[in-house]
Amino acid sequence: MDNISSKLLENAVNEFALLPGIGKKTAMRLVLHLLQQDEGRVQQFAHALTQMKENIQRCRNCHNLSDEPLCSICSDARRQHAIVCVVEDIRDVLAIENTHQYRGVYHVLGGKISPMDGVGPSDLQIDSLVQRAHTQELGEIILALSSTPEGDTTSFYLYKKLQGIQVPITSIARGISFGGELEYADEVTLGRSILNRVPYKESV
């Protein structure tokens, strides 16, 4: 975007444009909107971002994002703590929670195995999942990864790592189309995929 009269405005637009899905025109609209707000409102906006960056942490149990050492899901006594749903990141947790069809807990890997992107098993929270399976009394581990080659590779790797542990390993039903990410699935389809999960070895 050329001919911006203010360098300060241009810098702000450039920073907003670095956000995913935000182009220069959208960035300009957002910045101009903030300029129209009173100073207190803008300071509150900036404070929320700073507080998030400085204080948010990973749950010590499931690695979900949390304000406390233990996230609100892991600390909820009403959840079924013997059922662990393995997902890639917090967006998948939010997608599954929005279905209102799952009452277990989670294990957030922090991504999926992708050699092309330089992501290997050691870059993910896989060892801690294996440790949970060994040390906690689990009744089921659900593999709820995206239906992509990387997601399938990660699921297969997890299945092999967890073999020998006396815990049933299941996979969400293939209501999610191949190549689909969980966060983009509609709530009804995702909810049915959770409810109609099958033993992992039958899904391969």
Image (cartoon, grey):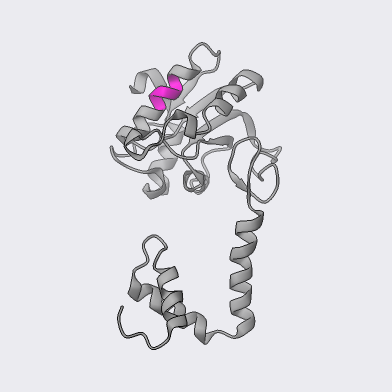
Residue lying at 66% horizontally and 44% vertically, measured from the top left: 71
| Residue 158 magenta-highlighted | yes
Q: State whether residue 201 appears in this view.
A: yes
Tell me: residue 193, above or below residue 155.
Answer: below
Q: Position of residue 102 (x, y in %)?
A: 53, 38
Residue lying at 44% horizontally and 34% vertically, measured from the top left: 144
- Residue situated in front as seen by the camera: 142 or 25: 25
Quadrant of the snapshot with the N terminus: bottom left
Quadrant of the snapshot with the C terminus: top left
Q: Position of residue 49 (x, y in %)?
A: 59, 64
- Residue situated in front as seen by the camera: 122 or 153: 122
| Farthest left residue in view | 178
Tell me: residue 203, above or below residue 190.
Answer: above
| Residue 142 magenta-highlighted | no
Residue lying at 37% horizontally and 47% vertically, measured from the top left: 185
Drawn side of residue 195 relative to residue 82, left or right: left
Tell me: residue 53, above or below residue 116.
Answer: below
Residue stretch rendered in magenta on the structure: 155-159
Residue lying at 39% horizontally and 33% vertically, measured from the top left: 113
Drawn side of residue 181 relative to residue 178, left or right: right
| Farthest top residue in view | 164
Q: Main secondary structure of the magenta part?
A: helix
Q: Position of residue 186 (x, y in %)?
A: 38, 49
In which image quadrant can residue 45 be found? bottom right
Q: State whether residue 199 appears in this view.
A: no
Q: Position of residue 96 (x, y in %)?
A: 49, 43
